[in-house]
Image (tube, rainbow, N blue to C red):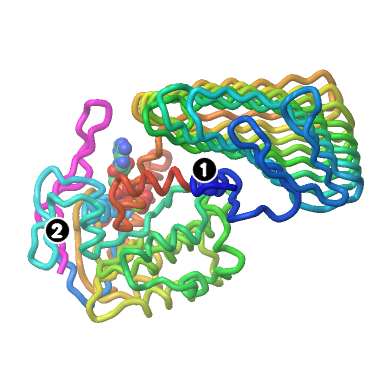
């Protein structure tokens, strides 16, 4: 079980403290799949980064299987079995895809060429390619997902895995994420996609830096739709006063 | 007879395990010690100066190794090599210098190479530098390469120096004639108190001459690096200079690419960047379980590949 307990997180930006997350409480149970969803900028990636140890919470604790891992660094958490596929994977000049997969594999037992095939890339075409700007957005994103699959961690957090992935491959992607899930893993998918929201056991709605709701698809979906429409009306209001009230 | 140390140095700079395939010349501590010519690839010692002439006949294909090793301290070696790749020949040439300096004096090698790649020929040239020592004696390497790429010829230069050389001042000059192509890769890593300078001047002489200069470097410790790649087009040529450096610790890096066109149909581009390893790169690799040091190492070795 991975627990985020009363997490507050502030970023220091030009000597100013900007609150990003407040009072975040989430239990992720082994064997379950979760979706984190919510508007842009609501704090979903920040939640993932706090779990991975990339961001250090300003208050609260992160517990993993009963152990307080709040003070552990990124590498140590990775070795405990937490993994995160970035929303915006960095690029590496000169590093071949093969090396990245091997680094991921070194601390796991997961890698073979199959991970590339699973996400729709032919190993022969990609193993020797370098992870620099020569790869397209969708390709780099797929390789990021393959890297997480190679790493094969117990806790796997995918940050908008579908972003930039073409529609044809989207179904395949959902299958891969679903199939890689096991009884002892926690799968968390940050996503806005209805299909992904349909696949998971529980949806967590993040809004304004905190968890605003948790529940099944049927409970959460109407809320998401409403909040999206509401957001739209708010932004239209400036020009057209007609949409003045925003039903909650 | 080659000693175990000789063999190790040869492996470092020329990837040689035992006797080289093809034609070769091995120079050790200021003297040619082993040499083999082949039909169409003549290697002869110069009569009036230290050094060799490598003459490749037109149309010949093959591999040539001309490594230099140094195993003594207080030694300064200067050589003049002339390499002539005949028309339409296709040659891989491995040069390079490995220094094991056992004492506290300097060990210095200055290699002056004059290379002709004749019409339609193709040359892939690799030069690796390696240095090590026991009592703090400096390892110094000052290579000068002057390259002539004739009409329709292709030359690829790979110049690599990863650790161990205290001081290097490299000069590379090239003239690329009409339809000639030149690609130059430079890879450099310095640390400690090491210094490295590289001056490159490539002249695009004619119609459709092209050149790419790609320089990647990592500067660690207190080391310092200077790059002056210059690309000059007299005619309607195309060229690209790219200098990319990772800077760490208290190192300094100066990168001054220059592009210079004397013809309105020339197309020249330069890019230069100096920066730390990006935080997100470290974080990504650490999230795979690497320590920060391992992550750094992996990023640098990829960058210099
Ligand atoms: N360096 C920064 N400086 C200022 N604000 C920041 C910085 N980094 C993040 N933020 C803010 O933190 C908030 C949460 O960001 P986060 O990336 O977690 O959102 P998200 O829910 O993942 O959004 P998206 O759906 O767009 O990916 C945003 O409002 C963002 O603007
Ligand atoms: Mg995000």
Residue at 91 percent of width and 46 percent of height = B58
Of residues A245 and A236, the one nearer the viewer is: A236
Verify whether residue A7 appears in magenta.
yes
Q: How many marks?
A: 2
Residue drawn at x 50%, y 59% is: A97
Given residues B27 and A206, the one toward you in this image is: B27
Q: Chain of mark 1?
A: B
Q: Secondary structure at mark 2?
A: strand
Subunit that carries the residue with mark 2? A
Q: Which residue is mark 2?
A: A4
Q: Is residue B126 magenta?
A: no
Ligand 1 within 8 A of label 1's CB? no
Q: Which residues are magenta?
A: A1-26
Residue B168, quarter of the rendered image: top right
The residues bearing labels 1 and 2 have C-alpha atoms spaced at a distance of 40 Å
Residue pictured at 91% horizontal, 39% vertical: B119
- Residue B112 locus on image (x, y percent): 70, 26
Instruction: Pick out the residue farthest to the front.
Output: B1
**Residue drawn at point x = 8 percent, y = 66 percent:** A66
- Location of mark 1 (residue): B304
Question: Where does the image place residue A107, in percent across and percent down from the top left?
Answer: 31, 64
Are tags 1 and 2 found on a single chain? no
Task: Decide if residue B216 is on the left or right side of residue A145.
Answer: right
Mark 1 touches mark 2? (CB < 8 Å): no
């Amino acid at each position: 079980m991975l627990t985020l307990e009363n997490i507050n997180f502030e970023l220091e930006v030009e000597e100013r403290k900007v609150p990003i997350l407040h009072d975040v409480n989430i239990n992720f149970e082994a064997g379950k799949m979760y979706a984190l969803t919510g508007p842009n900028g609501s704090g979903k990636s920040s939640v993932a980064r706090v779990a991975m140890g990339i961001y250090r919470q300003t208050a609260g604790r992160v517990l993993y299987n009963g152990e307080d891992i709040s003070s552990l660094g990124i590498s140590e958490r990775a070795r405990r079995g937490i993994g995160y596929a970035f929303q915006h994977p960095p690029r590496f000049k000169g590093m071949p895809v093969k090396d990245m997969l091997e680094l991921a594999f070194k601390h796991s037992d997961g890698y073979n060429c199959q991970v590339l095939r699973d996400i729709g890339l032919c190993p022969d075409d990609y193993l020797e390619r370098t992870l620099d700007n020569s790869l397209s957005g969708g390709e780099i994103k797929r390789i990021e997902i393959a890297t997480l699959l190679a790493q094969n961690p117990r806790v796997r957090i995918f940050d908008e895995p579908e972003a930039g992935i073409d529609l044809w491959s989207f179904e395949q992607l959902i299958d891969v994420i679903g199939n890689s899930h096991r009884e002892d893993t926690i799968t968390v998918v940050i996503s806005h996609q209805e299909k992904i929201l349909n696949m998971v056991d529980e949806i967590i709605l993040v809004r304004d830096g905190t968890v605003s709701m948790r529940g099944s698809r049927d409970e959460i979906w109407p809320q998401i739709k409403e909040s999206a429409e509401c957001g739209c009306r708010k932004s239209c209001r400036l020009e057209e006063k007609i949409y003045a009230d925003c039903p909650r | 007879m080659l000693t175990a140390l000789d063999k190790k140095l040869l492996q470092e700079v020329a990837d040689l395990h035992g006797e080289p395939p093809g034609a070769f010349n091995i120079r050790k501590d200021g003297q040619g010690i082993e040499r083999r010519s082949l039909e169409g690839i003549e290697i002869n010692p110069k009569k009036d100066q230290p050094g060799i002439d490598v003459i490749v006949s037109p149309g010949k294909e093959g591999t040539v190794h001309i490594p230099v090793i140094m195993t003594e301290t207080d030694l300064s070696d200067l050589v003049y090599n002339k390499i002539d790749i005949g028309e339409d020949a296709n040659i891989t040439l491995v040069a390079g210098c490995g220094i094991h300096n056992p004492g506290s004096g300097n060990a210095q090698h200055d290699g002056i190479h004059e290379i002709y790649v004749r019409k339609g020929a193709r040359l892939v040239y690799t030069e690796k530098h390696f240095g090590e020592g026991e009592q703090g004696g400096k390892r110094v390497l000052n290579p000068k390469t002057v390259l002539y790429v004739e009409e329709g010829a292709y030359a690829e230069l790979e110049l690599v120096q990863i650790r161990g050389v205290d001081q290097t001042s490299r000069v590379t000059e090239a003239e690329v004639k009409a339809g000639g192509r030149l690609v130059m890769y430079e890879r450099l890593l310095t640390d400690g108190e090491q210094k490295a300078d590289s001056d490159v001047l490539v002249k695009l002489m004619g119609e459709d001459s092209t050149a790419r200069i790609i320089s990647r470097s990592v500067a660690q410790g207190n080391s310092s690096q200077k790059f002056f790649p210059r690309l000059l087009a007299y005619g309607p040529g195309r060229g690209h200079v790219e200098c990319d450096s990772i800077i760490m610790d208290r190192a300094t890096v100066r990168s001054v690419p220059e592009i210079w066109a004397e013809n309105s149909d020339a197309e020249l581009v330069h890019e230069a960047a100096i920066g730390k390893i990006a935080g997100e790169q470290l974080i990504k690799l650490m999230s795979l379980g690497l320590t920060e040091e391992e992550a750094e190492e992996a990023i640098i070795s990829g960058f210099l590949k």
